[in-house]
């Protein structure tokens, strides 16, 4: 593993332990050149996923990008980081279990919206506003009225 401070390839693992949800291994590392300490996480990856964008472009799936967008939606909300991480792991597992190496950005967005709807209503609407590209206040009203109608149908 390359040191994030000096770029040296020679780093040593000082401590390894599973994360709370046991979906990853947390490793504390030390660089033999500069002495810098850093943490890495090792996760099981069932397959390499390719994301097909609306524009037709294809890019490698990036869990960190997914993580950043969800954390942004959850900013200043009372959701534990571990809960958010479990949701993200669940989305990734569902994507990997689709059985196809290529997934669409729409599939990812729908899974995230489902997960956020269960976690936090405000984060759900925040994410939806970006995902569905809201451009004016009426877009929020329309979305929320559809959400209310869907909730009434579920009852």
Image (cartoon, rainbow, N blue to C red):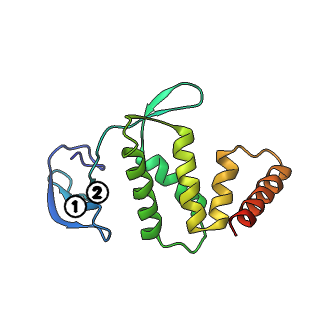
- Disc sitting over residue 38 in the figure: none
Read off the residue under disc 1: 27
* Labels 1 & 2 near each other (Cβ < 8 A): yes
Left of 119 or right of it: where is 141?
right
In x, y percent, where is residue 2? Answer: 23, 45
Height in image: 109 above or below 119? above
Residue at 63%, 54% in the rendered image: 127
In x, y percent, where is residue 51? Answer: 46, 35
Residue at 30%, 40% in the rendered image: 47
Read off the residue under disc 2: 41
Residue at 45%, 69% in the rendered image: 83
Instruction: Identify the mark nearer the N-term, 1 or 2.
Output: 1
Image quarter hosting the C terminus: bottom right
In x, y percent, where is residue 145? Answer: 81, 59
Classed neighbour count for the residue bearing mark 2: other residues with Cα under 10 Å, few (<14), some (14–19), many (≥20): some
Provide the secondary structure element on which disc 1 rests.
strand
In x, y percent, where is residue 77? Answer: 60, 71
């Amino acid at each position: 593993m390359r040191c994030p401070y000096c770029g040296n390839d020679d780093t040593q693992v000082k401590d390894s332990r599973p994360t709370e949800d046991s979906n990853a291994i947390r490793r504390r590392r030390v660089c033999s050149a500069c002495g810098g300490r850093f943490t890495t996480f090792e996760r099981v990856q069932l397959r390499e996923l390719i994301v097909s964008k609306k524009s037709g472009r294809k890019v490698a799936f990036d869990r960190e990008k997914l993580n950043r967008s969800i954390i942004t939606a959850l900013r200043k909300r009372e959701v534990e980081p571990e809960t958010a991480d479990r949701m993200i792991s669940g989305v990734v597992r569902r994507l990997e279990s689709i059985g196809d190496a290529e997934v669409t950005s729409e599939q990812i967005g729908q899974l995230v919206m489902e997960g956020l709807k269960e976690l936090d209503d405000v984060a759900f609407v925040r994410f939806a506003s970006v995902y569905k590209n809201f451009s004016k206040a009426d877009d929020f009203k329309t979305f929320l009225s559809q959400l209310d109608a869907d909730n009434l149908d579920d009852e």
